[in-house]
Amino acid sequence: MFSFTAKTRLYTPTVIAVTLLIIIFLALDFVERFLASQDLESKTVDVLQITALKLPQTSQEKLSLIEQTYQHYQEPVESTEAENENVGMSKEQQAKQQGQLTALFVDDFQLKLKAVINGQNLSDGSAVALVQVNNLKTGEQAIERFNDNSQVYGYQLSINSNTQITLVKMIEQAEQQLEQKVQLIMYKAAN
């Protein structure tokens, strides 16, 4: 049959066409890289001057006219000592707090349950409630640790679950003792 040698394969029309295409590509690449770069070096580049954007300024007369126009819409701010004393809730509103709450107001403090640590995780075996105490007058916040059956700002604390505690306060009204019972919960369940 036919026997091809290495010489005959190099001179086939396909090999010659591919070789010519590669040579043309290399020549174009050479021209593009070396000859065109010399043209770029000889060109001068104009640099645009960048200046800061100057925003329009309102004259002092227009500014005072605008302030006078809006002056009658502003209400005078007068803070009284009585308003500062009732930052959270009044004593009557605090006495009416009951049921499941995420925040309890006691005097100038707001109490929020942050965590209940199970007794198994502690060295003494008792459960502990961590309560965030916000001082409404000063704005200070602190996390305080309370044991089960301890006193918390006049309330008796009992731990119900890992997301709920019960706070009970005895109130004397009209020569009888009433029990104010609040369940402080970490979050309300979605309905």
Image (cartoon, grey):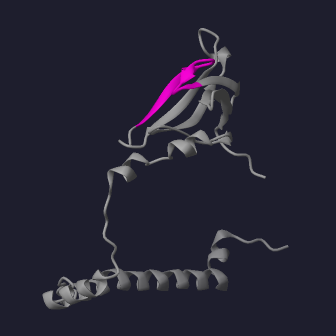
* Left-right relation of 90 to 187: left
Indicate left or right for 100 with 71 as reference. right
Q: Residue furthest right?
A: 1
Q: Nearer the viewer, residue 35 or 124?
A: 124
- The x and y percentages for residue 99 are 70, 40
Q: Main secondary structure of the magenta part?
A: strand
Image quarter of residue 150: top right
Measured from the top left, where is residue 115 in percent x and y? 60, 31
Q: Is residue 148 visible?
A: yes
Q: Position of residue 12 (x, y in %)?
A: 66, 82
Residue 57, visible in the rendered structure = no
Horizontally, residue 70 falls left or right of residue 154, namely left
Q: Residue at position x 61%, y 29% from top?
A: 171
User: Does the segment drawn in magenta span residue 142?
Assistant: yes
Extreme residue in the top direction: 124
x 20%, y 86%: residue: 63
* Segment tinted magenta in the rendering: 141-155
163 or 99: nearer the viewer: 99
Residue 191 percent across, percent down from the top left: 78, 52
Q: How many marks?
A: 0
- In this orientation, which residue lies closer to the viewer: 80 or 140? 80
Q: Nearer the viewer, residue 106 or 128?
A: 106
Seen in the picture, residue 12 relative to 1 is either above or below; the reply is below
Residue 76 in which image quadrant: bottom left
